Amino acid sequence: MSDASSDGPERPFTVIAIDGPAGSGKSTVGRRLATHLGLEYLDTGAMYRGVTFAALRRGIDPADAEVVARLARQVELTLVDGTLVVDGTDATIEIRGPEVTRAVSIVAANPDVRRELVRRQREWAEQRGGGVLEGRDIGSVVFPDAALKVYLTASPEVRAARRSKEVSDLSYETVAADLARRDALDQGREASPLELADGAVLVDTTDRSIDDLVADLAGMLP
Ligand code: DC
């Protein structure tokens, strides 16, 4: 077994924080940028969805803050290559379904749930020497000292169109209304609301190609 010193110079701890509302392009851009830079990628929204899934499966009311917080501390979440396993059950499909999507904002507004998931997100990055993390509070709370902080945005129409392509069983109108509702909840909550972090670069993805965006962001790294 070789020791770390024989593996050549160590790369410095590099975190890239990508925040923004649903449908702004965070996942697509985040995954592609991570591959481009040889970093791993973490979808933190999937973690909030995983806790919500676990609560619903146990018949726990998502608004029962204490019980949900306890669950968040106990639940096992394994996120690898876009697959989420929650306490041994593959929840990849269900976490994108309407029940979880409806309830996730209330779980994400729970400060004790946030504390636990932020702790896990920091640990995830520390174990990997950094990574690309995507969410709502990465640049503002989880890694305020990230090497690069990006806030992605796009017009509400384009965001709704992107999301309705992903969830083909719902109409554009239903998806657009749900996005508007979640935007208001994510931006209006008291605990770590979605906002432009200090030092974050604001990028509008409405009319941008993914290749162009990834090249642009990679070029912003110090
Ligand atoms: O990105 P998404 O739609 O899968 O996120 C699901 C929910 O979790 C959404 O309501 C915002 C919330 N979230 C959050 O509050 N903080 C994060 N770091 C990631 C997601």
Image (spheres, helix red, strand yellow):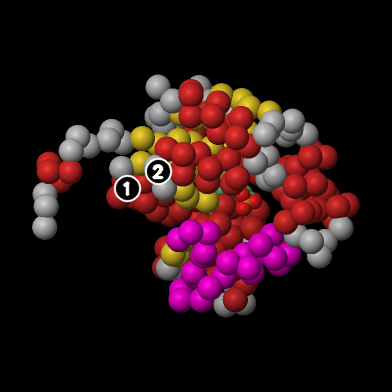
Residue for badge 2: 39
| In the depicted structure, whether residue 54 falls above or below residue 222 | below
Q: Is residue 65 visible?
A: no
> Disc 2 or 1, which lies upstream in sequence?
2
**221 part of magenta stretch:** no
Q: Is residue 7 visible?
A: yes
Tell me residue 58's x, y (percent). 57, 77
Instruction: Give the residue at mark 1.
Output: 128
Tell me where residue 129 appears, x and y as whole percent: 31, 42
Report the side of 120 relative to 19 (left or right).
left
Determine the residue located farthest toward the front in the rendered image.
211
| Residue 213, percent from left and from top | 60, 31
Which circle marks residue 70 in the picture?
none
Quarter that holds the N terminus? bottom left
Mark 2 or 1, closer to the camera? 2
Q: Are marks 2 and 1 in contact (CB under 8 Å)?
A: yes
Secondary structure state at the residue bearing disc 1: helix
Cα distance between the residues tagged 2 and 1: 8 Å
Residue at 28% from the left image edge and 33% from the top image edge: 12
Which residue is more in the foreground, 204 or 104?
A: 204
Pick whichever, 166 or 6, lies toward us.
6
Instruction: Report the span colored magenta.
Output: 80-101
Q: Is residue 92 magenta?
A: yes
